Image (spheres, rainbow, N blue to C red):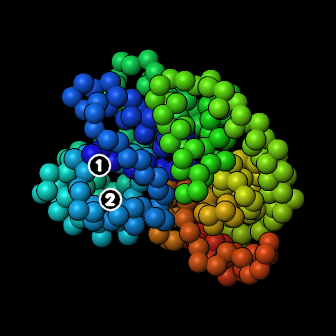
Amino acid sequence: MIVSLTHEHDLDGLGSQAIIRRYFNLSSENRNNEIIYYFADYTDFVKKINTILSTESIPSHLIISDIGFNDSFKEIFSNFKEAGNKGCQICWFDHHIVDESIKEEIRSIIHLYINDPEKCAAEIVKNYYLKNDKIASKIAEFARDTDFRTNRYDLASDLQSIIGYNRGAQKNKNKHKIVDLLSQGDFHNPWFTEQLSSLNEWLEEESTFSLNHAIIFPVESFGDLVVSWAKIGGGRITKILKQKYIGAKAFIGIDTRSKDVIIYSNFINCREFAREFEGGGHKERAGFKYPRIFKEIDVLNPSFIEDIKKIIRKFSH
């Protein structure tokens, strides 16, 4: 049994999983092995790993992709060691910023750990498993386009929207379908068109909602912070806010479906900011959780804003 655990939120995560799926489909040695998909983020990664490795049937392979690291993950290191001793080959492919000491510790515990911040996770996975495969290369190209926000491909943007539309455990069946279609190179399957038709109205409504509810908070010695929320991905909300509030220094988007918080800024180290809340990510974009974001429906908790402003000031010097 092969288990693939990836970042739920974006094309880089599901694209990585699709390349892994394609590799094992093409491999005569492993073609008949069952592949089980898991989806995670920073907030439930430890729980998912514990679930995978606490079963009686330990997988022969556990492949983690597009998940960075925060300090709470250290508690699973002993699980990794125990699983490795039982014959589970653990590989972890990532591109988030991780301290060198942590990288070395992870490498000493598992079979393989590759981290390259200059590439997206799908590119790293492709280079390892299917370097010269045209379909894997195209998946990686699309993933890079969305993850690095180069915005060259409308199709990549559409796929990202479809993935955002299908967040949450109740939509896992659809995420499985996305992974399988991508792994086959079926990028223009009619099912994708149906999904786009379903989500366009929803996306427009929620995008408008996020703009209508945006609030500007001046932060002393820094500049303006813009915060908003909607039933769409926090990353998408920050993009919307950034287009309208050009002079602002930081943007926070809250996905009210999952209470995930995304911060985007070119003026502070977002990863270090998110680590203050046991989150993580990239220098310009990172995610985290907060225990009580809203005081009541559509009313932000003042303590949430004060904590955000305090940490921004800490990292803006």
Residue drawn 48% across and 65% down? 43
Residue lying farthest to the right in this orientation: 212
| Residue density around tag 2, few if under 14, some if 14–19, many if 20 or more, within 10 Å | some
For disc 1, the marked residue is 62
Mark 2 touches mark 1? (CB < 8 Å)? yes
For label 1, the SS is strand
Q: Earlier in the sequence, mark 2 or mark 1?
A: 2
Which image quarter holds the C terminus? Answer: bottom right
Residue drawn 52% across and 30% down? 181
Front-most of residues 61 and 34: 34
Which image quarter holds the N terminus? Answer: top left
Percent x, y for residue 182?
51, 30
Looking at the rendered structure, the kind of residue marked 2 is: Ile
Q: Which mark is residue 52?
A: 2
| Residue density around tag 1, few if under 14, some if 14–19, many if 20 or more, within 10 Å | many
Instruction: Tell me: 281 left or right of 167.
Output: left
- Residue 315 lies in quadrant: bottom right
Spatial CA distance of label 2 from label 1 is 9 Å
Front-most of residues 217 and 205: 205
Front-most of residues 138 and 103: 138
Looking at the rendered structure, the kind of residue marked 1 is: Leu
Residue drawn 43% across and 39% down? 17
For label 2, the SS is helix
**Is residue 298 placed above or below 20 in the rendered structure?**
below
Q: Residue 177 carries which label?
A: none
Percent x, y for residue 199?
75, 43
